[in-house]
Image (cartoon, rainbow, N blue to C red):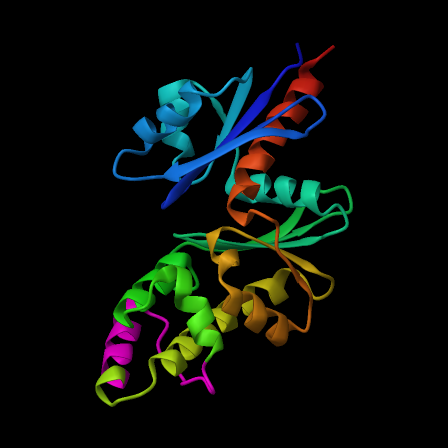
Amino acid sequence: MSIRFAGIDIGSRTIELVVVDEAGKIVDSVQTDTGFDPMTQARNLIDGMAYDRIMATGYGRSLFEISFEAATVTEIKAHARGARALFPEIRTVIDIGGQDSKAITLFDTGKVKKFEMNDRCAAGTGKFLEIMARTLRFGIEDFGQEALLADRELSISSMCTVFAESEVTSLIAKGESRREIARGLHASVIRRVAGMINRVSSQGDIVFTGGVAKNPCMQTLLEAKLCRTIRIPDDPQRVGALGAALLARDQSTADTP
């Protein structure tokens, strides 16, 4: 029977579990909401999954390491490894999750060459977009599509979530279009993200991972801003878990005499 390797990505909003075989092929994957007790949610996922070795990543990886005595890896390395497996020719990765965003560039070997990370405030993250969508009374799943339908974008001067929310409320009170406000909010996030990418990489296609990659307005505006092709995996949220699983496999291979 072949050995199976699992990767679990414990994010702020969701948890993904991916299992690969010895060849690195995905044989199983599941996802659940993180909820208020991520370790219980993680246990519910792994209890029903067959694997021989597991590696954790994401913001909850340290808790997982303690609870399950498992190896861990940073999100930067995990997303780099997962993106590289899906797009071997790619050298740049942008990961935007609920709590942070990361721009990563790779060596030809696939190793991380340079990265920038925004983890000190919600600006440029999924949380910022989620709060703004709620303020504008859009569902987060529809937010990007509604923004794309705007005829123009309204300028949003603040990237601080608290001040931006106040600014949006004021624009609504003035009778401004919700779609145009939404377009402006997306554009403000793109300016920050594009700056991160340009500081680590100046050319070539980009793999977009994380939950925010599902937002069509983010993809459209990012391509227009950078004049570079954005490549999105079939399931951008599981790239980190895939990378962790493959790194567990790589480590096992290296440990074999």
From the viewer's perspective, is residue 107 above or below residue 42?
Answer: below
Q: Is residue 167 magenta?
A: yes
Judged left or right of residue 114, residue 257 is right
Tell me, yes or no, if residue 137 can be seen here: yes
**Residue 165, horizontal then vertical, whole percent:** 27, 72
Query: In the depicted view, which residue is nearer to us: 252 or 148?
Result: 148
**Residue 112, horizontal then vertical, whole percent:** 65, 45
Name the image quarter holding the N terminus: top right
- Residue drawn 39% across the image and 75% down it: 182
Q: Which residues are magenta?
A: 150-171
Judged left or right of residue 123, residue 195 is right
From the viewer's perspective, is residue 56 above or below residue 98?
Answer: above
**Residue 196, horizontal then vertical, whole percent:** 55, 64
Name the image quarter holding the C terminus: top right
Examine the image and state in which quarter residue 248 appears: top right
Query: In the depicted view, which residue is nearer to us: 150 or 242?
Result: 150
From the viewer's perspective, is residue 2 above or below residue 203?
Answer: above
- Residue drawn 27% across the image and 69% down it: 137
Examine the image and state in which quarter residue 109 appears: top right
